[in-house]
Image (spheres, rainbow, N blue to C red):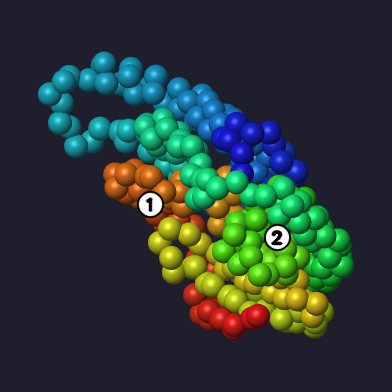
């Protein structure tokens, strides 16, 4: 995923029909959309810094006015007809997007308190050169089966009536070295299997993410699921996490008629931003062994705090989990 200060990535959610930048938002929904647009073009650190600086600049006149009024008032004044405090002029409905800078600052505080650990090596025994070469070759062959799947997924993006859009498309293939390491690890436990067979069963070697608007999430999911099935793909796993207190979204796994597996995730604009830009490093740390009870508590509480601000689309929780055993 990269660090908090990583460069801007080209795959950030960029929903269609954005309002003109020069227009002032007229409703809370317009405000959220414009704020989401601005946050999607910033790194984590710069998003916090720019929004904090803007808030400080907007707040300055009110703080100055408040200071003048308080200095002019008797300290024991309890008059009931005092004018409203200037801070009330700053009140605005709180949403996921207004809270995003706070999430980033909170994560920085957690990261500073709990320094990152080295990645755990589950098995220090060296892999034979031949086995490693086989794993690399098998991983490279996965990339040869990806273009036909991507072509159909791209067509679904263009044709679906729910206006769902793909995000992270440039990262649809797991890095060859990471995939080879996963294949090599499996070969240690299953030495009788062929590396190519193992590589084809790694469910996220090829992966895609669709973003949907909140008001068309359930119908969009059903439509895209049907379009994938009409391409000859079979869904063998669906996990609905919209009721999960620490993560929101739906993860599905598919198989082609040739047995190549791939993953498709379904997110909203907010749930994707939370997963991709805010909570991913916490998730990675929770997966590693060695975290203390206190650190794990802080990481899980952070994920819960972020997730509780993500709006849950209508009927998203009604989408059923599904599991089918595949060879």
Residue 48, x across and y down, in percent: 53, 33
Looking at the picture, does residue 64 appear above or below residue 296?
above
Lateral position of residue 19 relative to residue 323, left or right: right
Between 138 and 294, the residue placed more toward the observer is 138
Where is the N terminus found, in terms of image quarters?
Answer: top right
Element under label 1?
helix
Q: Provide the residue designation for mark 1.
A: 300
| Residue plotted at (48% across, 37% down) | 118
First along the sequence among labels 2 and 1:
2
Other-residue count near label 2 (Cα within 10 Å), few / some / many at <14 / 14–19 / ≥20: many
What is the C-alpha distance between the residues marked 2 and 1?
Answer: 27 Å
Position of residue 12 relative to residue 223, above or below, is above
- What's the residue at 34%, 24% (across, down)? 66
Q: Is residue 167 left or right of residue 116?
A: right
Q: Label 1 crowding class (10 Å Cα cut-off): few <14, some 14-19, many 20+? A: some
Give the residue number, with chain letter if any, for mark 2: 205
Q: Which label was assigned to residue 104?
A: none
The image position of residue 7, as x and y in percent, is: 68, 33
Q: Position of residue 170 (x, y in %)?
A: 77, 50
């Amino acid at each position: 995923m990269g660090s908090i200060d990583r460069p801007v990535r080209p795959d950030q959610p960029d929903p269609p029909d954005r309002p003109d930048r020069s227009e002032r938002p007229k409703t809370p929904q317009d405000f959220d959309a414009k704020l989401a647009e601005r946050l999607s073009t910033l790194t984590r650190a710069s998003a916090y810094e720019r929004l904090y600086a803007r808030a400080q600049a907007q707040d300055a006149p009110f703080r100055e006015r408040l200071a003048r009024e308080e200095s002019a008032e008797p300290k024991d004044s309890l008059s009931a007809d005092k004018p409203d405090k200037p801070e009330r002029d700053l009140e605005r409905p709180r949403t996921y997007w207004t809270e995003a800078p706070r999430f980033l600052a909170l994560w920085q505080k957690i990261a500073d308190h709990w320094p990152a650990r080295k990645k755990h090596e589950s098995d220090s025994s060296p892999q034979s050169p031949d086995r490693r070469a086989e794993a690399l070759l098998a991983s490279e062959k996965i990339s040869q089966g990806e273009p036909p799947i991507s072509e159909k997924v791209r067509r679904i993006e263009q044709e679906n009536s729910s206006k769902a859009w793909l995000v992270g498309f440039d990262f649809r293939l797991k890095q060859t070295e990471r995939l080879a390491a996963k294949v090599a690890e499996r070969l240690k436990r299953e030495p009788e299997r062929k590396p190519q067979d193992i590589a084809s069963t790694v469910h996220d070697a090829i992966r895609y993410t669709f973003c949907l608007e909140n008001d068309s999430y359930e119908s969009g999911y059903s439509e895209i699921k049907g379009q994938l099935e009409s391409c000859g793909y079979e869904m063998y796993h669906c996990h609905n996490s919209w009721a999960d207190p620490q993560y929101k979204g739906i993860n599905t796994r598919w198989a082609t008629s040739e047995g190549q597996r791939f993953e498709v995730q379904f997110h909203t604009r907010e749930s994707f931003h939370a997963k991709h830009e805010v909570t991913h490093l916490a998730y990675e740390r929770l997966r590693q062994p060695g975290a203390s009870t206190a650190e794990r508590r802080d990481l899980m509480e952070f994920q819960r705090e972020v997730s509780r601000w993500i709006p849950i689309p209508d009927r998203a929780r009604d989408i059923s989990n599904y599991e089918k055993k595949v060879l």
